[in-house]
Amino acid sequence: MSLLDVSPVVPVVVVDDVARAVPLAEALVRGGVRIIEVTLRTDAALESIRRIVDEVPDAVVGAGTVTTPALAAAALAAGAKFLVTPGTTDSVLAAAADTGLPVLPGAATVSEAMRLAELGYSDLKFFPAEAAGGIPFLKSIAGPLPTLRFCPTGGITATTAPTYLSLPNVGCVGGSWLTPTTADPSTIERLAREATALRSG
Ligand SMILES: O=C(O)C(=O)C[C@H](O)[C@H](O)COP(=O)(O)O
């Protein structure tokens, strides 16, 4: 199964406090969202991935913000089940592929998307979605690039997600709105439940 088909919404999580990781992942799973992208932007990120892997077996946790080859290797060592890159350089893509994990590589332009297609990637992250053209961009490229599917991420909200999800070249959307840094587990569970209902939207 493609990463794009696990959940209509992929929560993009920034964890500042390792102690928050497991309760947050449990709340997402209770709300029906099993996939979690932990961004490697904080010191707590790798240990958070480790703990979620160990303690929340129903979660499928991956690493986001994979911007260097070293981060790809570190994410694999921490137990990440997939990798997401915001953009794609040769070295990051090679290191990500070397891990053997599923990779969702980032693209923001037609040329970047075509290059990734040439390399065999048909499921891409479209980042930063809203800033790089959003829904009109995705509609425009569906004609010339019909084999590509996207997970748009960046600036998407619960309000705009349904329109993205209605596009034929969108498999899921990513966003941080499910896991606000101050939210308690019951709020995250509710936001997750609302997100799972979006597939039909
Ligand atoms: O860190 C990465 O790897 C990224 O690609 C960035 C994130 O996907 C976006 O920051 C999430 O966007 P928001 O939902 O607007 O907060």
Image (spheres, rainbow, N blue to C red):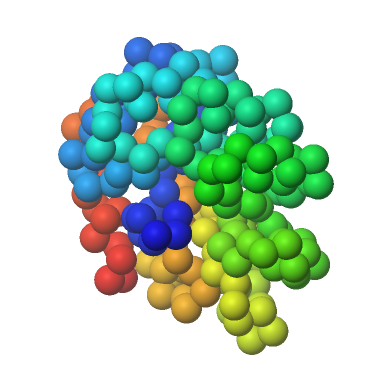
- Residue 58 at what x, y percent from top left? 25, 37
- Please give left or right for residue 190 compared with residue 66 in the image: left
Q: Can see residue 142?
A: no
- Residue 12 at what x, y percent from top left? 47, 40
- Residue 192 at what x, y percent from top left? 27, 45
Q: Name the quadrant containing residue 139.
A: bottom right
On the rendered image, what quadrant is the C terminus found in?
Answer: bottom left
- Please give left or right for residue 19 compared with residue 38 in the image: left
Residue reaching furthest bottom? 143
Q: Is residue 126 above or below residue 188?
A: below
On the rendered image, what quadrant is the N terminus found in?
Answer: bottom left
Residue at figure coordinates x 30%, y 62% from the top left: 198
Q: Can see residue 39?
A: yes
Residue at figure coordinates x 54%, y 59% from the top left: 152
- Please give left or right for residue 95 compared with residue 124 in the image: right
- The image shows a total of numbered marks equal to 0
Residue at figure coordinates x 74%, y 44% from the top left: 94
Of residue 176 and residue 35, the one placed in the foreground of this image is 35
Q: Is residue 200 above or below residue 86?
A: below
- Residue 157 at what x, y percent from top left? 43, 53
Of residue 9 and residue 88, the one placed in the foreground of this image is 88
Residue at figure coordinates x 27%, y 22% from the top left: 55
Q: Name the quadrant containing residue 182.
A: top left
Q: Name the quadrant containing residue 121.
A: bottom right
